[in-house]
Amino acid sequence: MSDREHDHGTGLSRREFLGFTAAGAAGTALVPASLLSRQAHAAGKSKYEVAPGELDEYYGFWSGGHSGEIRVLGIPSMRELMRIPVFNRDSATGWGQTNESKRILGESARFQNGDTHHVHMSYTDGTYDGRYLFVNDKANTRIARIRCDIMKTDKVITIPNVAAIHGLRLQKVPKTGYVLCCAEFRIPHPNDGRFLDEPDKYHTMLTAVDADTMEIKWQIIVDGNLDNVDTDYTGKYAAATCYNSEGGVTLPEMMKADRDWTVVFNIPRIEEAVRQGKYTTIGDSKVPVVDGRGKNNPYTLYVPTPKSPHGVNMSPDGKYFISNGKLSPTCTVISVDLIDKWFAGKLKDPRDVVVAEPELGLGPLHTTFDGRGYAYTTLFIDSQVVKWSIADAIRAYRGEKVDYIRQKLDVHYQPGHLKASMAETKEADGKWAVSLCKFSKDRFLPVGVLRAENDQLIDISGEKMKLVHDGPTFPEPHDAIIVHRSKVHPRKVWRRDDPYFAETVAMAKRHGVVLERDNKVIREGNKVYVYMTSVAPNYGLKEFRVKKGDEVTVVVTNLDKIEDLTHGFCIVNYGINMEIGPQQTSSVTFVADQPGVHWYYCTWFCHALHLEMRGRMLVEP
Ligand code: RUQ
Ligand code: CUA
């Protein structure tokens, strides 16, 4: 571990280093022309700095860990652009409170927390297609889908029969395809209290979800547990790491074996088994469950991998799965061609699919790629990122005397995931990488006992990696993807026929209300529906009257059509607040349990008369 004075591999102090980067970058073809010209005027400006008014070249999508959300950053500036509430609750937008978000959260809306780790974008033909993001919830065994056109969560489902979805990846070709979900913790089947103290009856499974319909298609039982997963570029295989092949329930039990394994799933064979009815079901669930346990089943290949491996990453050339050893200083490189041979019955030993096992340093967790044949692996214990040549590691494994390690860069501190630009696609472009460090220690002003994490930006465009930025983040990003901005096309104003609020529109229709015009109150027994429009700086209703005990549904339709003109709707002392973007309809339902005058007001600063944008809810006793 190094201290803050370390030279980051350049031999210069941070201050000197920043000046050096600006000068050194001038004239290289890797720097966008717009930045180069500005650099001439802005002394000391580095190519990772994005000037006021300029836009970033990449979107970064970050998981928020136990904050339960997703964050959107600009890369290389590392500016946080947006937070997308997913499994958490959000005071600003009303996520978890509006009727629209409750419908999406479904039966699991009772949970207030989530734990997102792995966020990935949908693919077409091996690269990002800008349709969806998918993310896991380890805390409550769910997965969610986010629409990239509006950057809102649009589906949340609970995965049955398993516990704690951790690893999550998408099929890359011909398009996504399945969302493949690893359940980390082993539980009894069924988990209804019948079996408690018999760990040999605990199991876990990989789950395949259809990305378009979000239906659960099948599950497959494995030996051991499941940690992370990745998919190949043929659509045939997924590979997942297992750190508890022992099936232990205590830490010493889980660490006994020197090798655990990487399990490779043969997806066409699993699909065939489901078609032929070779499956069981568990409890009330109708999901087909295929048995992938044992050395001689046709669906899985268990590749012995040292020791308690964590991340598994597919190289962008489609050739190798790389399992990161965690408690072993090695990464295990598994060849997709040889996996083909294994399943064709042409190999004897499951280790025959291994083509390299480079020794990299202490605590390898995750690997990323630059598309030029180099791999970059985080070393958790050493607090370093190591750059290594895959081809040279393979030659060394064959016995040749070659050094496959190119550079070790100190990061601060204890990195988990590392992600390079476009690295999870066939278009890996090797410009930027972000090291998501679990500890920041002395890197930022102390802010109490709880500290920020440190997401560090690394320039990987040259021969040597250069650390160029410290990015504090609220706990705890695990994984991130860096997507070229040409792939993402968010809307600026809502579509009036957006399915996000279609059910609310249907309700209005049943009431004979035209949302784009009407301001009226409809009473059905003790249910009251309050429909109003908003145009800055006015709500369509200056007041409405209900009775104590009424169930009130307020529906607000924002008629403003101007980009960025969002209104809010907050009722004082009722715990209600929601976002209504331009052309959006939002609704919230609550019981009017406190008589009296209750002002409602706009929470988004929308106009010079924003403070005056308010009205009264009059609750009769
Ligand atoms: S996985 S580093 Cu590695 Cu969820 Cu967190
Ligand atoms: Cu509308 Cu502020």
Image (cartoon, rainbow, N blue to C red):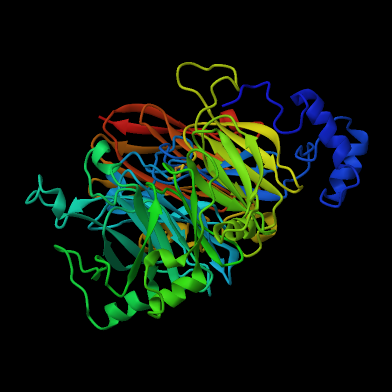
**Residue plotted at (60% across, 40% down):** 385
Answer with left or right where residue 278 lies relative to residue 462: left
Answer with left or right where residue 79 lies relative to residue 360: right
**Residue plotted at (42% across, 49% down):** 520
User: Can residue 478 be seen in this snapshot?
Assistant: no
User: Can residue 474 be seen in this snapshot?
Assistant: yes
Task: Pick out the residue farthest to the left.
Answer: 194
Task: Write down the quadrant of residue 45 in the picture.
Answer: top right
The image position of residue 524, as x and y in percent, is: 26, 52
The image position of residue 292, as x and y in percent, is: 27, 67
Number of numbered tags placed on the structure image: 0
Answer with left or right where residue 50 lies relative to residue 341: right
- Quadrant of the rendering where the N terminus is positioned: top right
**Residue plotted at (28% across, 66% down):** 220
Ligand 1, seen in the image, is in the quarter at top left
Between 495 and 559, the residue placed more toward the observer is 495
The image position of residue 221, as x and y in percent, is: 25, 63
Task: Write down the quadrant of residue 236 in the picture.
Answer: bottom left
Task: Write down the quadrant of residue 3 in the picture.
Answer: top right
- Quadrant of the rendering where the C terminus is positioned: top left
- Please tell me whether residue 284 is drawn above or below residue 306 in the rendered image: below
The image position of residue 185, as x and y in percent, is: 27, 48
Between 411 and 122, the residue placed more toward the observer is 411
